[in-house]
Image: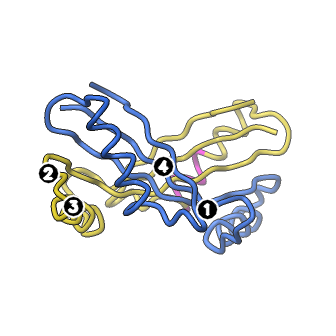
Chain colours: A yellow, B blue
Amino acid sequence: MALVVVDVMPKPEILDPQGKAVTQALERLELPGLTVRQGKRFEITVEGEVTPERLEQIKQAADMLLANTTIETYNVRVEGQ
Amino acid sequence: MALVVVDVMPKPEILDPQGKAVTQALERLELPGLTVRQGKRFEITVEGEVTPERLEQIKQAADMLLANTTIETYNVRVEGQ
């Protein structure tokens, strides 16, 4: 069993209303000077070993399924084998 | 400027319909053997330095604002100073 993590974040030029709402909530809690962007985290448990071929398939899935690459960027990494 | 990342994930015993939907979509794409859990990733840009006191405030904010600790766990870490 291995763990692959895919992080999906809104591109810097894209408005992020959820992140903005959190930023404003932090200000109301008297925690200024913090700017929040909100994205998604996918934890993918892989049966068996993460071969380079398997990782390539997961990258394709991230590109097609997990991220909307028009407005989001993604990062795929193996966290534990 | 420093970056603090907060990952929020559903607790293992909590159903995760979004993650399940992605898992099933991967099966339909002929990528079996992958189990997905979906959570949130917050990237917090901090003005100035992340002092231990500042980090403690962010942990409190994660606990109160970013995660619903009844059903979610969270992890706070400094990614770049």
Can you give x and y, in whole percent of width and height, for residue B50 in the image? 25, 31
Q: What's the mark number on residue A29?
A: 3
Q: Secondary structure at mark 4?
A: strand
Q: CA distance from mark 1 to mark 4?
A: 10 Å
Quadrant housing residue B52:
top left
Give the prevailing secondary structure in the magenta stretch: helix
Q: Nearer the viewer's eye, disc 4 or disc 3? A: 3
Tell me where residue B80 sits by quadrant. top left
> Marks 4 and 3, how far apart in space?
20 Å
**Residue at the image position 84 percent from the left and 45 percent from the top:** A47
Rate crowding at label 2 as few (under 14), some (14 to 19) or many (20 or more) other CA atoms within 10 Å.
some
Q: Nearer the viewer, residue A71 or A1?
A: A1
Query: Can you identify the residue that label 1 sits on?
Result: B10
Kindly identify which numbered label has been placed on residue B7.
4
Q: Are marks 3 and 2 in contact (CB under 8 Å)?
A: no
Residue mark closest to the camera, 3 vs 2: 3
Question: Marks 1 and 3, Cα distance to the nearest angstrom?
Answer: 25 Å
Residue A4, percent across and down?
65, 41
What amino acid is at disc 2?
Pro
Q: Are marks 1 and 2 in contact (CB under 8 Å)?
A: no
Name the disc covering residue A32, or none.
Answer: 2
Identify the residue at image location x=32%, y=60%: A71
State left or right for residue A36 relative to residue B66: left
Q: Tell me which amino acid carries mark 1.
A: Pro
Asked if marks 1 and 3 fall on the same chain, the answer is no
Residue sitting at x 14%, y 31%: B48
* Residue stretch in magenta: A59-65
Foreground: A1 or B75? B75
